[in-house]
Image: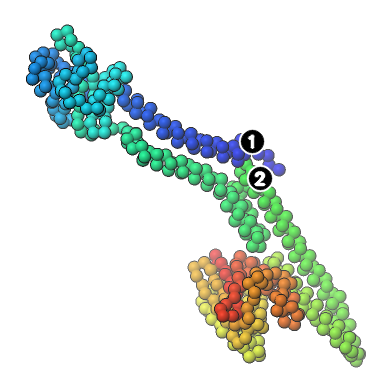
Amino acid sequence: MLKVNPFNRLFFKLLLGFWLCSSLIIALVSLLPLLQLNQDRSPLPPSQERILKKMAEHIQQQPELLTGNLLQRSNRGRDPNLGPLRIYITNDAGQVINTKRVSRVFRRFQLMAEEANHPISHQFRNELIFGPYQFDVEGKSYNLFGRFPDNHPRPWFFFFTDNKLLTAGFAILLSGLLCGLLAWYLSKPLRSLRLSANALAKGDLANRVDAATASRRDEMGQLAIAFNGMADAIETMVNNQQRLMGDISHELRTPLTRLQLSLALARKKGQHSTELDRIEYEALQQEALISELLTLSRVRLNASEKRLTAELNETLSQVLDDAEFEAEQQGKQLHINIDESISFEHLPKTLSRAIENLLRNAIRYAEKTVSIESTQSKNHITIMVTDDGPGLPEAELEAIFTPFYRPDSSRDRESGGWGLGLAITQAAIYAHNGKIVAKNRLPHGLMVTIDLPTN
C-alpha cells in the first residue's frame, strides 16, 4: 500500500491552500496603504524643485513682493509645460501669508510634508501639490508650495486606494478565483473516480481511473489505486463467473445429448408413452435453456466475434425477414423504417441477436402493430422498436433486462421464456458501448430505444 507523506495529505493541502489564499488577499490589500505612504514620502522631483527655486529667487531679489498688495498677487503663475500654477507662501509658523483661501487638501499636504520631514510631491484626486522649498528673506524663513489644478499621472495603486468598494470587489473576485483553482485541483480526481465508477456500474469492466489520478501522493491517489484494484477483482470475478456458466452449460450438453439419443432409440424400437413424451419435451426445453445461457455468456465475454464495418440494413436483413413472417402468421403488421445509408463498425451476429429478441417480444405482446426504425446523428445511431401492446408497470422497465426475470404477466414458460432474451440484448448493446432503455407509450404500448456510438 502506498504510504502518504503527512504533508501530502488533503488536510494539509486544504489548510495551506486556503491559508495562502487568504494571506495573499490580506497582503495585497494591506500593501496598498504602504505603497501610498511610500509614494507620499517620495522626494520632490527636480522639475518641481526648479519651479519653487526660481520663484524663491524671484522673491529674494524683490523682497517687496512679501508686503502689501503685491503679496496677494504672488500666488499665481504659469508653467509652460504643466499649465496654471498656484503658489502658497508660509511663514515660520506654517501660516499661509499670500492668500486667505486655503483648502483642506493643502492643509493635509502640509501635515504629510511635515511627517516626511523633506520636500515631497503628491497627486490628489484633482490637483498636484509639491513642496516645501525653504528660503530666507531679510532674516526671516519662508516656505514655498506649488499647486497644479490638473489631474496629472498617478501610480496605478492610487486607483484602488481611491475606490474602496471596487478594491473590495476585486479582492473578493481574486479570492474566488484562487479558491476556484484549489477546488478544481481537489475535485478533478473525484470527477475521474465518479466517471470510472459510473462506467463500471454500467458494465464497462475494463474502465479504470486514469494514471494521473492514481499517481497522486495523497488520499486521492490511494483511493484511485484501491478503486482500480477493486475493479480488477470485479472484472476477474465476473469473467470467471461467465466462463463458469459457459463451461457448465457446455458440459450439460453431453448428458443431454445422451438422453436425446436414448429417446430416439426408444422411439425407433416402437416404445411410446406419455412419460417418454414428457421426457422428450423437458429435454428440448433444457437444450434451449442451455443454448440461451451459452449465448449470454459469449456475448458478455465478447469473445466469439470481431467488429466489422457493415450496413445496418444488411446486418438485420435475415432478422427482419423472419420477423415479418412471424408477424404475418400472428395476424400482425411489422413496419420497417431503416435508412439503407447507415453503416458503422459493429458486431453483426451480436447486434442481430439483440434486435431479434426485441422484435420477438414486441410481436408476442403487440395487439396489431410493431415498428422498427433507425436514425443517425453525428456520433450516434438510434434504433427504436415499438409495439401497441399493454406495456409494463414502471417498476419493471429496468428489471426486464435482468437475467431470469420475467414480468408478472409472463410467468408461464410458454409466453415468458426463461427471462434471458432481454438480458442477452442488454449484454449485446453494452458490448457496443451503447445504451438501451424501455419506456411505456401513450395510450399503451412499449418502446425500447437503443443508442449506439459510432466513434
Mark 2 crowd level (few <14, some 14–19, many ≥20, 10 Å Cα): some
Q: Residue at x 87, y 78 (%)?
A: 258
- Evaluate if marks 1 and 2 touch, with contact meaning CB atoms under 8 Å apart: no
Compare residues 185 and 347 and report the one nearer the observer.
185
How far apart marks 1 and 2 lie (CA) works out to: 13 Å
Direction from residue 71 to residue 260 in the image, left or right: right
Residue identified by numbered label 1? 6
Determine crowd level at label 1: few under 14, some 14-19, many 20+ residues with C-alpha closer than 10 A.
few
Q: Quadrant of residue 242?
A: bottom right
Dot 1 lies on which element?
Answer: helix
Q: Which residue is mark 2?
A: 222
Residue located at (77% from left, 76% from top): 289
Please provide percent x and percent y for residue 135. 19, 13
Q: 412 or 385: nearer the eye?
A: 412
Can residue 418 be seen in this snapshot? Answer: yes
Q: Position of residue 26 (x, y in %)?
A: 45, 33
- Residue 421 vs 24, above or below: the answer is below
Residue 72 drawn at (x, y percent): 11, 22
- Closest to the observer, 240 or 200: 200
Quarter of the image for the N terminus: give it. Answer: top right
* Residue type highlighted by circle 2: Gln
| Chosen colour scheme | rainbow
Q: Amino acid at mark 1?
A: Pro
